[in-house]
Image: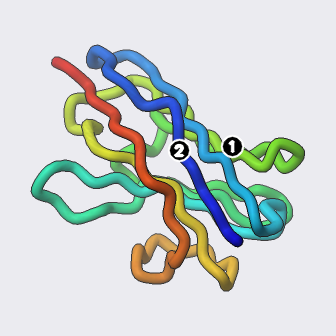
Amino acid sequence: QVQLAESGGGLVQAGGSLRLSCATSGFQLSTSTVAWFRQAPGKEREFVSYIRGSYGIPYYADSVKGRFSISRDNAKNTVDLQMDSLKPEDTAVYYCASNSWAAATTQRKIYNYWGQGTQVTVSS
C-alpha cells in the first residue's frame, strides 16, 4: 500500500527558510518519481518540483528555481524540499505525490498517490 506523509510546514518570515519532508512507503523510492505540489487559497494546485529515477534527477518550476532544492534519501525513504528565500507568494498547502508509472511529469492528473499536505505560511 502506497503511503506518503508530509511534515515540516509552519510559519516563517519572508526571506526565511523551511525544510519539508515526505515520508514514503509501499514502493521503491530509488526508481520512482516523487513530486511536490502546492495549493494556495482560491488557486489551482500547482507543480513545484520533482525528483526522478535512479540518479535522483531534480526538476523545478520556474517560480522556485534557485530558491528550492529537492533531495532524496533512499535508505530512509524520504524526499525533502529545502525552501530558502521564501516569499509571501510561497504561502500554500504543500503536497508530495507519486504515481504508479514512475512518470516524471509536472501534470497533476498523472499523480495518483498523494499525502495529506502541510501548511506553509510566509509573512511579509
User: Left or right of 33: which side holds 96?
Assistant: left
Residue occupying the point 41% across, 49% down: 117
Q: Residue 71: which disc?
A: 1
Q: Position of residue 68 (x, y in %)?
A: 50, 37
Residue occupying the point 21% across, 65% down: 44
Q: Position of residue 119 (x, y in %)?
A: 34, 38
Residue occupying the point 53% across, 44% down: 6
Relative to 120, say whether 107 is above or below: below
Quadrant in which the N terminus is drawn: bottom right
Say which residue label 2 marks: 6
Q: Amino acid at mark 2?
A: Glu
Q: Position of residue 39 (x, y in %)?
A: 28, 54
- Decide which of tag 2 and tag 1 comes sooner along the chain: 2
Quadrant in which the C terminus is drawn: top left
Q: Dot 2: what SS?
A: strand
Q: Dot 1: what SS?
A: strand
The quarter holding residue 92 reads top left
Q: Position of residue 8 (x, y in %)?
A: 50, 30
User: Left or right of 81: which side holds 26?
Assistant: right
